[in-house]
Amino acid sequence: MPPFKGIDFCLLDELLSEDERLVRDSVRDFVDREVLPIIESCNRQGKFPEDLIQPMAALGLLGANLEGYGCAGMNPVAYGLAMQELERGDSGVRSFASVQGALCMYPILAFGSEEQRQHYLAKMAKGEIVGCFALTEPDFGSNPAGMLTKAQRRGDRWLLNGTKLWITNGGIADVAVVWAKTDDGIRGFLVDRDKPGFSTKDIAGKFSLRASVTSELSFQNVELSESDRLPQAEGLTAALRCLNQARYGIAWGVIGSAMAVYDEALEYSKSRVQFSRPIAGFQLVQEKLVWMATEITKAQLLALRVGRLKEAKKVHHSHISMAKMNNTWMARECARKARDILGANGVHDEYQVGRHLCNIESVYTYEGTHDIHTLILGEQLTGLSAFE
Ligand code: TGC
Ligand code: FAD
């Protein structure tokens, strides 16, 4: 496969700094060399490519936008471009980086004690400790405020009981950020894998994100000390602030998925001959390609603007909701159109479009479904909450 050249119809590269382009190009090269050659086989086997953790860490991709503790300290746009390139490889590989950095390292940095930061962060940036983020439960997905997992005070200890479901990295994680109800409201805890009473079970049978570990986490009378609690993580807002970080990365990541399927469909349509001419010459095929290129360009502009707002500390969580919602929808539509252009070959894993098509269904649902983000934006625009 020739090296990927990117899709930049409106010359948006001119709006990027040299450092941002350098990050993008080095992750692009990494994905071409180390992800694409192995990912289809991992997807077939339903196996996360753990061998990629160390190379990703060496590129500074774990906690990439965090400052200090051995993290790369990338600006939001460089970080977004890195997520875009990873997801061009596979949404599962980007998910690993999102969960490690945005959902596990970020809460330790933002809400943890100095002791917790010193203990976990540098090792997590090196990929020596893997983390996961446990918010969703079997009966509480879109509405995490209803969670049943409880942490009860027992003198200077805590007793944790409950079940979390659909947890990315769960089965391979050394530490879980767990959200639980206490008498004082929702709080965040760091639960190390070896705590008695903590067990995980990987979810089999997924047709989506097959190259990613997704697990059920069970806590039965897990004893924690006060030093296992994230001291500044108070209320659901703290968990939602972590989600903002991850949703921002997804808004960029899915552009990578869309680029991958557009590129594959474009090349295929130029070489596939029907009725004595390349199908790229038919108006209906061109319409699909033009739709994809236009929507990718609009998504790039939205992500870039939200990134610049984030850098200027002017971003609101509803901006991030708009970018996650729109860009994931765009990538999902691109995958469907690209699959169509490939005809029967589009349903075979010799081509990547089928894998992206299946993956994007999870991305459409996780980190707040498309409809939940619509309602978050609805509330922002009207001042009326559809949830109450
Ligand atoms: P609501 O009353 O609206 O909000 C509670 C408090 O939080 C504040 N808030 C936010 N703060 C920061 N960032 C945000 N995004 C915030 N959204 C709300 C809000 O102002 C309020 O503050 P205060 O001071 O007034 O108390 O809460 P609600 O219970 O009505 O629910 C709101 C809703 C639906 C938006 C929220 O619960 C939600 O986002 N649901 C979706 C759940 C979700 O996204 N789960 C993701 C799980 S993790 C995952 O999927 C990882 S996938 C792996 C990967 O990333 O690759
Ligand atoms: P539900 O909340 O039951 O929603 C089902 C449908 O109802 C959706 O279409 C939804 O939009 C709609 N709906 C719900 N409420 C409303 C409403 N008020 N108005 C209109 N429509 C509504 N979670 C974690 O905590 N950590 C992880 O690492 C993680 N990784 C994941 C990995 C994968 C592969 C997947 C698939 C999920 C993961 N999740 C994770 C869970 C994910 O965040 C939830 O699936 C998501 O928040 C939706 O919850 P749900 O699946 O329970 O769907």
Image (cartoon, helix red, strand yellow):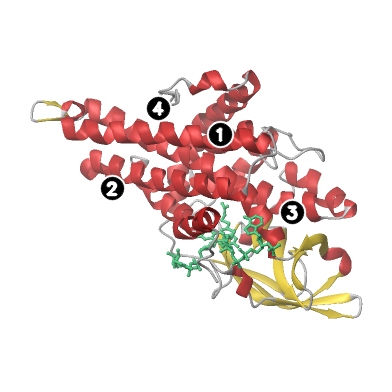
Q: Earlier in the sequence, mark 3 or mark 4?
A: 4
Q: Amino acid at mark 2?
A: Val
Q: Earlier in the sequence, mark 1 or mark 3?
A: 3
- Which corner quadrant of the figure contains ligand 1? bottom right
Q: Earlier in the sequence, mark 1 or mark 2?
A: 1
Q: Residue at x 58, y 22 (%)?
A: 16
Q: Do the numbered discs 2 and 4 sit on residues whose CB atoms are within 8 Å?
A: no
Q: Do the numbered discs 1 and 3 sit on residues whose CB atoms are within 8 Å?
A: no
- Mark 3–mark 2 Cα distance, whole angstroms, equals 40 Å
Instruction: Residue under label 1, please give it.
Output: 305
Mark 1: give few (<14), some (14-19) or many (20+) Cα within 10 Å. some
Element type at marker 2? helix
Instruction: Residue under label 3, please give it.
Output: 107
Residue 344 lies left or right of residue 304; in this view the side is left
Q: Amino acid at mark 3?
A: Pro
- Mark 1–mark 4 Cα distance, whole angstroms, equals 32 Å
Instruction: Residue under label 4, please give it.
Output: 1
Which tag is nearer the camera, tag 3 or tag 2?
3
- Mark 2–mark 4 Cα distance, whole angstroms, equals 19 Å
Element type at marker 1? helix
Which tag is nearer the camera, tag 2 or tag 4?
2
- Mark 1–mark 3 Cα distance, whole angstroms, equals 25 Å
Q: Earlier in the sequence, mark 2 or mark 4?
A: 4
Pinpoint residue 215: horizontal percent, then vertical percent.
57, 64
Which tag is nearer the camera, tag 1 or tag 4?
1
Q: Earlier in the sequence, mark 1 or mark 4?
A: 4
Which tag is nearer the camera, tag 1 or tag 3?
1
Q: Earlier in the sequence, mark 3 or mark 2?
A: 3
184 and 387: which is toward the camera: 387
